[in-house]
Image: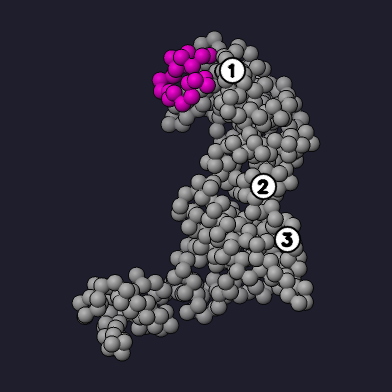
Amino acid sequence: MEWLVEMIVSKNAEYILSTLEAAGFEAYIVGGAVRDAQMGKVPSDYDIATNAKPKEVKALFARTIDTGLKHGTVTVIENKTGYEVTTYREETGYRDMRHPDSVNYVDELSSDLKRRDFTINAMAYSPKRGFVDKFGGKDDIEKRVIKCVGIPEERFKEDALRMLRAVRFAACLDFELSEDVFRAIRKCAVLIKNVSSERILGELNKILLCDKPSRIKLLYETGLMKYIIPELCNCFNTVQNNKYHIYNVGDHIMKAVDNTPNDLILRWSALLHDSGKPNCLSRDSSGINHFYGHHRESVRIANDVLHKLRMDRDSINDILVLIENHDVRIDTSPASVKRMLARTGENLFLKLLLLQEADNRAKNLKFLDDKLSKLQAVYEQCQTIIAERQPYQISQLQINGRDLLKIGFKAGREIGDMLKLLLDEVVIDPSLNTRDYLIKRAIILKKKRS
């Protein structure tokens, strides 16, 4: 196990362990750090379990933070980094499916490990005392399976978020759910309704940021989806039945999500971009399915879903802009590209092209090359516009509302309408974006409208 020492014990963590041991206490690294080390990964953080009581931990270290004293947790600060140090404990009774009725400190590490969620998270390691694995976590890592410590239903009733965590670990580690875990989630899925939106969003974000985000389909397969994003459930039962598609709506969405770069805004946009299709299904006389207006319905659904999950306003706005425009065919002309730039802004425009590429890669590949060549041409046109600083927004005009006020325009709509007219001209011919021309042109247009 010498390799394990090298991989999981940072200098700061080793100092905390050795300090506790020197004072006569046991101390182990537990949870995710041990799991990651067993999988050959470098841990990003370290949680420590000990039989020292919180007051005894606080007495041993110069700087601590009382982050969870009633649950036995003290954060020890070493070299500006925090390490959670938790006293061995057992929990009894769960009054609200998350918080236990009582927390009792115990002397045995095994009692502490027994309360944990999954076997792969119930391992411990100490440079002095070695590796502890009482629930077969190492074997489950080798088998690439998610199993609960003890009876799955009991673990999920203690904290229903554990069902979503099981899916997240399966997705991010590329593991499978054990049969008993899968069955227990299907049986207990409704309990996820008792979990706060913020906690659910945190887990969904982690799933979407893993290497294969389409594993989020496990939410549908386990029955969790209908209590979190029910609108996606019908997507898996909606066939597309036209020459451009070879998957049902749900599986097309999964393919699109997998094709996006590792960016949360893009992956949420891909996940919800066609969520409105089931509500917009129509069939023509030839038996071909159409989904007219599905982008607007998808925006409505996404807005509802993301607000319920308590996502931040800026992220929601960006996602909705991408969904609204995901199916827009952008012409390669400078004017067309500028109009879309005006809708999205530079950063979102580039993300829109990535979303459209991901969307097309999830369709019938027979048409892909043509779609990609057009997107590449649009991208190159965009780069030229940006490099040459060609105007596409009112704020880039060489005059503003104050200038129009000085030449007799009335404050309000009249000014806004005139600036839009001037922008339309400048979008077509950037050389017209001079103060002299725009003032003269505004005077001429004002007279014509009088």
CB contact under 8 Å: marks 3 and 2: no
The numbered disc on residue 89 is: 1
Check if residue 67 falls in the magenta segment.
yes
Q: Which disc is residue 132 wearing? A: none
The one of 428 and 320 positioned closer to us in this rendering: 320
Residue 165's image quarter? Answer: top right
- Residue 246 on the magenta span: no
Q: Amino acid at mark 1?
A: Arg
Label 3: state its secondary structure.
Answer: loop
Of residues 193 and 126, the one drawn nearer to the viewer in this rendering: 193
Residue bearing mark 2: 226
Disc 1 to disc 3: CB gap under 8 Å:
no
| Image quadrant assignment for residue 172 | top right
Three-letter amino acid code at the position of disc 2:
Lys
Q: Position of residue 382 (x, y in %)?
A: 49, 72
Q: Earlier in the sequence, mark 1 or mark 3?
A: 1
Q: Is residue 84 left or right of residue 171?
A: left
Q: Secondary structure at mark 2?
A: helix
The three-letter amino acid code for the residue at tag 3 is Thr
Disc with the residue nearer the chain's start (2 vs 1): 1
Q: Badge 3, how many Cα within 10 Å: few under 14, some, many 20+?
A: some
In this orientation, does residue 308 appear?
yes
Out of 314 and 183, give the one closest to the viewer.
183
Q: Is residue 240 left or right of residue 199?
A: right
Q: State whether residue 223 is above or below residue 115.
A: below
Return the x and y of residue 315 as percentages of the image width and height: 49, 53
Write the start and end of the magenta stretch as one range: 50-72
Please name the residue shown 21% across and 80% down the image: 407
Comparing 67 with 25, the one in front is 67
**Residue 342: image location, x then y, percent:** 44, 70
Residue with the mark numbered 3: 238
Quadrant of the frame with the N terminus: top right
